[in-house]
Image: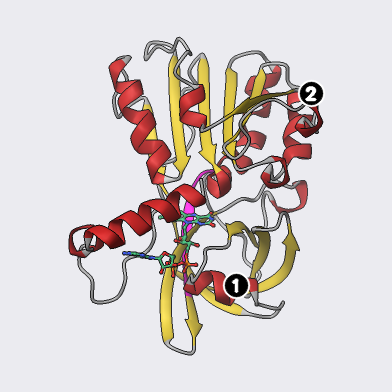
Amino acid sequence: MQIQVRLERVRSLSSSTKDFRFVRVDGEPVSFVPGQFFRFVFTDQAGEFERSYSLCNFESDCLHGEFLDLVISTVDGGRASKLLFDAEPGFEATVSGPFGRLVLPEKLPKRLFLVATSVGIAPYMPMLDALRDSLRQGDVDVYFFYGTRDAEEFIYGQFLSAFAEQYKNFHLTVCYSRIESGDASIISHTNVTVRFGYVQNNMTELKMSPATDHVLLCGNPMMIDDLYPQLKQQGFGVRQVVREKYVFAKRPGVKNPAVEMTAEQKRLLAEKMKKYS
Ligand SMILES: Cc1cc2nc3c(=O)[nH]c(=O)nc-3n(C[C@H](O)[C@H](O)[C@H](O)COP(=O)(O)OP(=O)(O)OC[C@H]3O[C@@H](n4cnc5c(N)ncnc54)[C@H](O)[C@@H]3O)c2cc1C
């Protein structure tokens, strides 16, 4: 089903990231399961094109309503980035969805690991509200690992820190990929364990087990490609590890970009992905 949506609000969260509130033009509620994404069709001077975005509805006023909240990190030379980061309220798009299997398992495990890089945090934000009862009753321990460049890019830090204060079995770790060692001044939030380097390198010491643990991975494809083999070695399979890679959209006329790219283009793309991790 296609829905018409209109941009209602834009807020800047960091130098590279904004959140965008779209609203259904027909005023009907948006139906989705926390974790799912929608496909947005935008129109610019070159015509229509499509990009996927996870819903990041987590504030109390938008959990069940006509809103679609997105959190988007700008990409150099990106077509949607350009359009959205210049957009004013009133800008419209066509949306279809929801899609995706990065959702909470029907039966919660003893330990749930939510791992994200950058805007890969988006699908987890709506899940937090859905986890409140289980956290309150002590039915689950949630381990939230967030990889981001530095403290300025620790988006939703205040909300997450308050959530960790409220639920002692919500364990929050932030890993700063652009900071090499500990400086107490960067620890701007309480209830947060701070680590340095890539998030996947900070999970190697964890003793995890497929018998008790369920893992969701979202964001940078390189993080996911590094972490999944580590988990496989510990006995995890596709049932206990759900992955959602924020891959770039295919370019028109290019069937398989990975195959059709030259070695130099592949190197440039890998550098670009690293930059956004
Ligand atoms: C399921 C899913 C959910 C997503 N959710 C989110 C979300 O919640 N928030 C978010 O910010 N993003 C999300 N994304 C990513 C999002 O869909 C866009 O890819 C992202 O916003 C960049 O789009 P763009 O049009 O700005 O960049 P694009 O125009 O797609 O290009 C990005 C950059 O990469 C370069 N590039 C692209 N393809 C190639 C190629 N084949 N070879 C070499 N260089 C190339 C371009 O030149 C450009 O500089 C999600 C992706 C998926 C698949």
For residue 12, what is the image quadrant?
A: bottom right
- Give percent across and percent down for residue 178: 60, 40
Q: Give the quarter of the figure containing the N terminus.
A: bottom left
Residue 260 as seen in the image, left or right of residue 94? left
Amino acid type, callout 2? Glu
At mark 1, the secondary structure is: helix
**Mark 1 crowd level (few <14, some 14–19, many ≥20, 10 Å Cα):** some
Q: Is residue 3 visible?
A: no
Residue 210 vs residue 131, the one in the foreground: 210
The quarter of the picture where residue 149 lies is top right
Examine the structure image and report whether residue 136 is included in the region drawn in magenta: no
Q: How is the rendered protein coloured?
A: secondary structure
Q: Determine whether 141 is above or below 47 in the image.
A: above
Q: Is mark 1 within 8 Å of ligand 1?
A: yes
**Count of numbered badges drawn on the protein:** 2
Image coordinates for residue 163, horizontal then vertical, percent = 75, 30
**Residue 247, relative to residue 236: is it above or below?**
below
Q: Residue at position x 39%, y 45% from top? A: 221
Q: Residue at x 69, y 45 (%)?
A: 155
Type of secondary structure dominating the magenta stretch:
strand
Q: Is residue 68 above or below residue 226?
A: below
Residue that numbered label 1 is attached to:
84
Q: Residue 251 at what x, y percent from top left?
A: 31, 71
In terms of sequence position, does the residue under pointer 1 or pointer 2 come before the other?
A: 1
Choose mark 1 or mark 2, whichever is in front: 1
Magenta part of the chain? 34-41
Q: Residue 272: horizontal and vertical position, in percent?
A: 44, 56
Residue where numbered disc 2 is placed: 165
Which kind of residue does numbered mark 1 sit on?
A: Leu
- The one of 60 and 158 positioned closer to us in this rendering: 158
